[in-house]
């Protein structure tokens, strides 16, 4: 069983941090690099709904006219 | 101008002017990001379909009622609706998510990887399977930040607003999600390709 950790403190571990402007850069260099690598795989595991679901939605929308 | 060249706001206007193609393009454009965000939270393909459908019914009703706030971006707004419906679902069920083996289908599985050997493909598929399992193992609050940031392209401020926490907390959860994934990958000796 792999244990995951949860934050004890939420303060980023680097200086010059402005919460209102938080971007991926605010994550710190190591996390940012890892996230960049992860993005490709996150895109590749993306899934999509069935076409029939989308057709139902479009039919519903047309029915409201 | 082609529909694909129009931005979300223009498509909303088109739809409100009575052109159904505006809605169809919006759904086609964002369906994968929205559906994946829901699916990775609820871990059930059929439930994800239902929540995706309910999300867009709310979207359609709000747009048709003229209640859409044009100041916000379309995708974050839809992700917020989907997120609330997922929360509602778990509240109704009064249970925490359970890992299932049920899987959706990968978009990229329908594509052909002609330049990829059988071995590479098997490794890639195994990596994706492991990654999905690892995402499912993340604490829910870390998982939702990761999914909103990546698939919803939401800023940390938007995520903080949706999840009712401070920006610091949203950022902290993202860092922990990444740290946890990295640790799990190290444990399983899994690496990400450049």
Image (spheres, grey):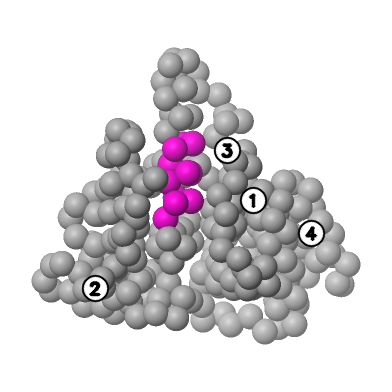
Q: Quadrant of the C terminus of chain B?
A: top left
Q: Which of the 4 image quadrants contains residue B41?
A: bottom right
In this rendering, the label closer to the viewer, 4 or 1 = 1
Q: What separation in Å lies between label 2 and label 1 (alpha carbons)?
A: 32 Å
Query: Does residue A53 appear left or right of residue B83 in this picture?
Result: right
Q: Quadrant of the N terminus of chain B?
A: bottom right
- Pinpoint residue B162: horizontal percent, then vertical percent: 48, 76
Q: What residue range appears in magenta?
A: B128-138
Q: What separation in Å lies between label 3 and label 2 (alpha carbons)?
A: 36 Å
Residue at the location (63% across, 70% down)? Answer: B94
Q: Does the residue at mark 2 contact the one at mark 1 (Cβ under 8 Å)?
A: no
Query: Does residue A26 appear left or right of residue B102 in this picture?
Result: left
- Letter of the chain that mark 2 sits on in the rendering: A
Confirm whether the magenta stretch covers residue B133. yes
Q: Which residue is mark 2?
A: A9
Density class for disc 1 (Cα within 10 Å; few <14, some 14-19, many ≥20) is some
In this rendering, the label closer to the viewer, 1 or 3 = 1
Residue B3's place in the image compared with B84, above or below, is above
**SS type, badge 1:** loop
Density class for disc 4 (Cα within 10 Å; few <14, some 14-19, many ≥20) is some
Q: What separation in Å lies between label 4 and label 1 (alpha carbons)?
A: 23 Å
* Numbered label tally: 4
Q: Which residue is mark 4?
A: A58
Q: Which residue is mark 1?
A: B44
């Amino acid at each position: 069983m792999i244990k995951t950790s949860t934050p004890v403190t939420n303060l980023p571990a680097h200086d010059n941090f402005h919460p209102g402007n938080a971007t991926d850069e605010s994550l710190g260099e190591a996390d940012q690099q890892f996230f960049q690598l992860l993005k490709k795989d996150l895109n590749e595991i993306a899934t999509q709904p069935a076409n029939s679901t989308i057709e139902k939605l479009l039919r519903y929308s047309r029915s409201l006219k | 101008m082609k529909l694909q060249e129009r931005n979300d706001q223009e498509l909303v206007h088109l739809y409100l002017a009575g052109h159904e193609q505006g809605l169809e393009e919006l759904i086609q454009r964002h369906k994968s990001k929205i559906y994946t965000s829901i699916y990775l939270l609820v871990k059930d393909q059929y439930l994800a379909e239902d929540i995706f459908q309910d999300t867009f019914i709310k979207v359609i009703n709000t747009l048709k009622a003229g209640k859409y706030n044009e100041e916000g971006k379309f995708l974050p707004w839809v992700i917020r609706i989907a997120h609330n419906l997922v929360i509602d679902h778990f509240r109704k069920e009064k249970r925490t998510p359970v890992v299932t083996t049920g899987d959706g289908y990968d978009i990229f599985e329908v594509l052909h990887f002609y330049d990829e050997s059988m071995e590479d493909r098997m490794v890639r598929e195994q990596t994706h399977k492991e990654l999905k399992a690892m995402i499912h193992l993340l604490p829910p609050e870390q998982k939702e930040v990761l999914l909103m940031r990546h698939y919803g392209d939401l800023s940390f401020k938007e995520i903080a607003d949706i999840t009712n926490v401070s920006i610091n907390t949203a950022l902290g959860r993202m860092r922990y999600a990444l740290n946890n994934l990295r640790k799990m990958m190290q444990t399983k000796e899994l690496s990400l390709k450049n």
